[in-house]
Image (spheres, rainbow, N blue to C red):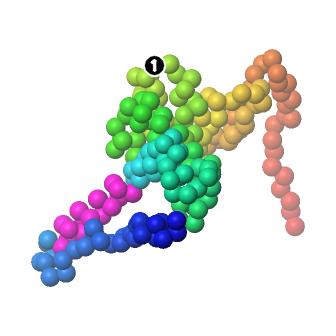
Amino acid sequence: MTDYLDKYNPSVEIFEHYQVQKYADKEDRAFNYWQNLVKAKRSQEGLFLVIGKLLRDIRDEKMYEVLDYETFTEFLNSSEVSFSRESAYLYIRTYEYYIEYLELNPESVSKLSVGRLAMMIPALKKIGDKSEITEQIEKYSEMRHSEFVREIKNTTRKDNRPSVYFSKEVDKWIVSYYDDSTVLQSLGNYEEETTEW
């Protein structure tokens, strides 16, 4: 089986599709560099969706067995593929939810990071209507990272613990809590101690 895999093991020439003619005039070279940069960036942004689809298809069609692996996990652990089970399923879930279930445009989806998209899924699943989900995705995508994480935690929180964070806008600590499960104890006003030497 090793000979078979070696025969079909893809070699990747990273720069093959991004060559610029060195003898073209400066204006043409500048445009070609720009064009290649945009093409590379767009390709890179959507690769996590391609990876998710390929992994899902290999898993669902049990293609790993044809490649002489007993389980999907064994396939993921191969030296050529080398994905943790957690990472593989993150890619698969992201592809299935945004592309297959929500039927969103892959180019639009690829503008957000796979980590942010994965974090959104539990919060978005609480919304029934697909058009409302799309609106919420837009809101989430416009948030700064810290604001986004806080919003996701508050939306998906399954316990009654208070959340505490510092708001630069009001220059104070914000405590969000449930009245029936929290007792707040005031420590009075905060005064910085100054030590004189």
Q: Position of residue 31 (x, y in %)?
A: 18, 66
Image x and y of residue 120, in percent:
54, 36
Q: Position of residue 37 (x, y in %)?
A: 30, 64
Lateral position of residue 144 relative to residue 86, left or right: left
Q: Which residue is mark 1?
A: 129
Residue at horizontal 72 percent and vertical 34 percent from the top: 163
187 and 181: which is toward the camera: 181
Residue found at the very far bottom of the displayed protein: 23
Residue depicted at x 85% and y 24%: 183
Residue type, mark 1 in image: Asp
Q: Does residue 171 lie above or below 182 as drawn?
A: below
Give left or right: position of 143 versus 87: left
Asked which secondary structure carries label 1, the reply is loop
Pinpoint residue 195: horizontal percent, then vertical percent.
86, 59
In this picture, is 38 found above or below 104?
A: below
Look at the image and give the residue range highlighted in magenta: 29-44
Could you tell me if residue 171 is visible in this image? yes
Q: Quadrant of the C terminus?
A: bottom right
Q: Determine if residue 52 is in view.
A: no
Image quadrant where residue 174 sits: top right
Q: Main secondary structure of the magenta part?
A: helix
Using a 10 Å C-alpha cutoff, classify the residue at mark 1 as few (fewer than 14 neighbours), some (14 to 19) or many (20 or more): few
Point 59% across, 31% down: residue:
122
**Image quarter of residue 157:** top right
